[in-house]
Image (spheres, rainbow, N blue to C red):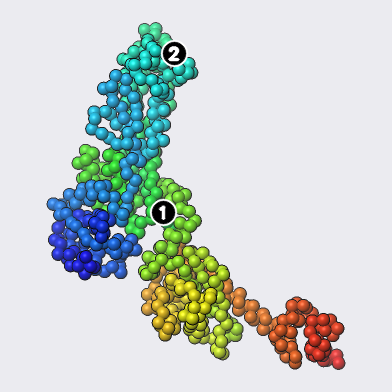
Amino acid sequence: MTREELKLAALSLPYEPGVYLMKDASDTVIYVGKAKKLKNRVSQYFQDTASHTLKTRRMVASVDHFETIRAASEFEALVLECSLIKHYMPKYNILLKDDKGYPYLRLDLREPYPKITLAGRVADDGAQYFGPYGSRGRSQQVIDTIRTVFKLPNCNKKFPRDIGKERPCLNYQMQRCEGWCRAEKTQEEYRALMQQAALLLSGKHKPLCDRLREEMEAAAERMAFEQAAQLRDRLRAIESLGQRQLVTAGTMADTDVIGWYQTEAKACFAVLHYIGGNLMDKDYEVLTRPEDEQEALSAVVKQYYLSRKAAPKRVLLPFAMEDAAPFAQLLLEQLEKTVRFIVPQRGDNLKLVALANHNAREEAERATTASERLNGTLKLLETMLRLPTYPTRLEAYDISNIAGTDIVASMTVFVDGKPKKSDYKRFKVENLADQDDYASMRQVLCRRFCHYLDGDKGFDERPDALLIDGGTVHAQTVREALSTMDIEIPIFGMVKDNRHRTRALVTPDGAEIGIQATPAVFALIGRIQEETHRFAITYHRTLRSRRVRGSALDEIKGVGEKRRLALLKHFKSISAIRGASEEELRKVVPASTAQAVYAYFHAQEQ
């Protein structure tokens, strides 16, 4: 379908809630979204595309056709959206890793000799599932801890098949296992320990300790001191571990605190789990930086809790989440649990969110490389300036002069955000007696792009954008100069603040684009402006120094450019030339010139 056909199709949709599926030419679902009113939401994609974010513009450019599914309510649309995103995993939706990243522990007490094993997801098989945990490594650590506390087997023997067939292994000799392969150990004892392990994994730490204490005291009263000692050791081990080691905070937490932070290229979603006011665990997920923080937070929160099939009583958020109310209703239906989503404004809860944000920042910055930072900054610049293409090559220009003398211009080049000094150019402005920055800039840009049109080496690269030191009129002057050559390149003036730092960029039409609120872009433009100014000033000082140094020699008959440079190169300064003898001067220039130079500086003496 053409863009106009897509627009007409969107305008024909009803003012009803539902879900829309954007598809490309191969009929692949590339985006799934929901809407309170399908007509309003879907038609926005195909009308004012200039106001879209870069990601949305790319998605819309890939859309060949779309489908919609009407829903009875906004809540039903939310449920359907979550289901379709999980099913299709669309390219342009913000996606977390699937629930393979959150393993469970499985225990089936119906087996004769049950074992705790890892499971990727919860199955409807009658077994008990504990979790989910943050990673497979964390889950395996919990299994190993349970084995240590209860002295369970860690071998490949099958029970009851291998009971009494061989001598107990080294673990038994080292008192790491009770030796369940021995004939004297009973199935009832083994199952009792596994039931205790299930209580511990369920978070029933205190009731388990109370039960073990009663059994220990009863054994001591019966004078079964060996058994009492074993129960005492197990009780101490469990008390020292407590909930912090074994209970999955994702399941047992009463409060989750969400943190969010974005670098130039990455974003991190962090979750701190609290039980009874104590921090128990942390989860985090690093994502590609999204363009819309609120949309991203809403997407990842929904996927996080639905994939884990567990949620706390309260979730503290760093900022408002879209669809918080219908999502809470969905969790109530699926998990049979009331969850409150809160955005703290003050007090201890706000401090907890600040801590979660700090954790998110650390993980995001750790995951972002230097090249990713630069690449992300340039993508931000592309979005902010609405450039037609990624700004691989940026050229910046500055004029330098003092009282209209030695007017020069600099051209610096930044490729992929880094200075490319081999492409720098310097211009000496010609035929201008007075200081006129606009005329100087016009001359310099015309000369630069005349070389470009002629294909001259060193000028044959076309920039993706031009940055001009100055304001709206400077940018207008450059646009007018390029228009006479039928060249269209985005042009922006670099507007300075009272501290001589670029505070904003301005278009030839006078539209100002603030950059101070985006630190990465502010820093990049600042570096470009400073480098361009430095290069211009350096060239201007060089020319002025040459003019001042060479002025005395220029008045001497027979001293041209080559002989003047030869004298300065040999003697280093005018004062040294003045103090040289005629014989010393003849070593550098012809005898007649040496005589003229000597006579000029010693005329008064003669």
Q: Name the residue under label 1.
A: 266
**Of 243 and 45, which appears nearest the observer?**
45
Does the image show residue 589? yes
Does the image show residue 449? no
222 is higher (above) or lower (below) than 210: above
The disc, 1 or 2, on the residue closer to the chain's N-terminal end is 2
Whether label 1 touches label 2, CB < 8 Å: no
Query: Dot 1: few (<14), some (14–19), or many (≥20) neighbours within 10 Å?
Result: many
510 is higher (above) or lower (below) than 52: below
**Of 503 and 563, which appears nearest the observer?**
563
Q: On residue 156, which mark appears?
A: none
Q: Mark 2 points at which residue?
A: 167
Task: Give the x, y percent position of residue 483.
Answer: 40, 83
Question: What residue sits 32% from the left and 50% below the top?
Answer: 95
Question: Which type of secondary structure does the marked residue at label 2 adopt?
Answer: loop
Task: Give the x, y percent position of residue 32.
Answer: 25, 54
348 is higher (above) or lower (below) than 404: above
Question: What residue sits 54% from the left and 71% below the top?
Answer: 423
360 is higher (above) or lower (below) than 219: below
502 relative to 187 in the view: left or right: right
Question: What residue sits 74% from the left and 84% below the top?
Answer: 563
Task: Give the x, y percent position of residue 276.
Answer: 35, 36
Question: Which type of secondary structure does the marked residue at label 1 adopt?
Answer: strand
Q: What residue type is labelled 2?
A: Arg
Residue 581: image quadrant is: bottom right
Q: Which amino acid does label 1 sit on?
A: Lys
Question: Which quadrant is home to the N terminus?
Answer: bottom left
- Separation (CA) of disc 1 from disc 2: 56 Å
Question: What residue sits 20% from the left and 54% below the top?
Answer: 19
444 relative to 147 in the view: left or right: right
Which is closer to the viewer, label 1 or label 2? 2
